[in-house]
Image: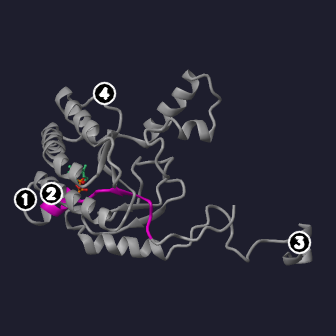
Amino acid sequence: MPDVPTPATPRHVAIVMDGNGRWAADRGRVRTVGHRVGGTTVRAAIKFARQRNVRVLTLYAFSQENWSRPEAEIQVLMRLFARAFRQEVAELHREQVRLRFIGARTRLSAALLQTMASAEALTAANTGLEVIIAIDYGGQWDICQAAQRCVTDGLAVSPEAVTARLSTAGLPDVDLLIRTGGERRLSNFLLWQAAYAELYFTDTLWPAFDDAAFDDALQWFATRQRRFGAVPLGHAVTPQSVPARAARS
Ligand code: FPP
């Protein structure tokens, strides 16, 4: 594959929004205060992504592993999601944002599922920023359900067939994956879709991830040379460029 020049702006940005609990603890507050302030950061990040002409913004709101958190914290998060999806959707619709949800949907309440379905239906024809909220999501789950659908459809499991059956079907692959909160791992987020993503880790806790912090990530992305497994232009190995001894071994 030829060397691909990095466009200044990533088409698809995905974010692991980590650090809500620590942000609250640093201020002597309960963890759920961090989640509430984190909700405000989500709104600001969507606005910033629109301003910077990002096409797709995928946010990791709740992983399948998050079900093992204390029940009280799960309840607060679910209420926060329901309120946010209800209250923000009209404004997002005005801004031509298209809202979609990815994840298993088997353990979410009927009321939350209804709110999510209404938000998706209202914004389905919008042509601006696509905001994908990953909720009850796991990258391994996504790959497995896509592979299972290949089998059900009577197809051989191939990269193309799986890609077309992922929860993100039709979206571009992730260009830039940001994780806030200091950890350096993917935590089962978009494992397939981020195969060639540039990975940006910052110690900034999610509630403190403001426009300047987002801009730092985009500026860093613009300096990356993306090779997708190839070599830089002008560095291709030819028979003439390999020393005779190396060429023999
Ligand atoms: C991880 O930080 C964060 C979550 C599991 C929840 C993310 C939720 C929000 C940002 C709230 C609003 C979201 C939407 C989509 C409206 P953590 O609490 O595990 O942080 P810690 O590592 O400091 O404990």
Of labels 1 and 4, the one closer to you: 4
Q: What's the residue type where badge 3 is placed?
A: Pro
Q: What's the residue type where badge 1 is placed?
A: Arg
Q: Are marks 2 and 1 in contact (CB under 8 Å)?
A: yes
Of labels 2 and 1, the one closer to you: 2
Q: What's the residue type where badge 2 is placed?
A: Gly
Earlier sequence position, callout 3 versus callout 2 = 2
Most foreground residue, 205 or 102 = 102
Q: Is residue 207 left or right of residue 6?
A: left
Residue located beneath label 1 in the image: 29
Residue 245 location (% of width, % of height): 91, 75
Q: Does the closest atom of ligand 1 sit within 8 Å of the Cβ of label 2?
A: yes
Query: Range of the magenta residues?
Result: 9-24
Q: CA distance from mark 2 to mark 1?
A: 8 Å
Residue 212 appears in which quarter of the rendering?
A: bottom left
Residue located beneath label 4 in the image: 106
Residue located beneath label 3 in the image: 239
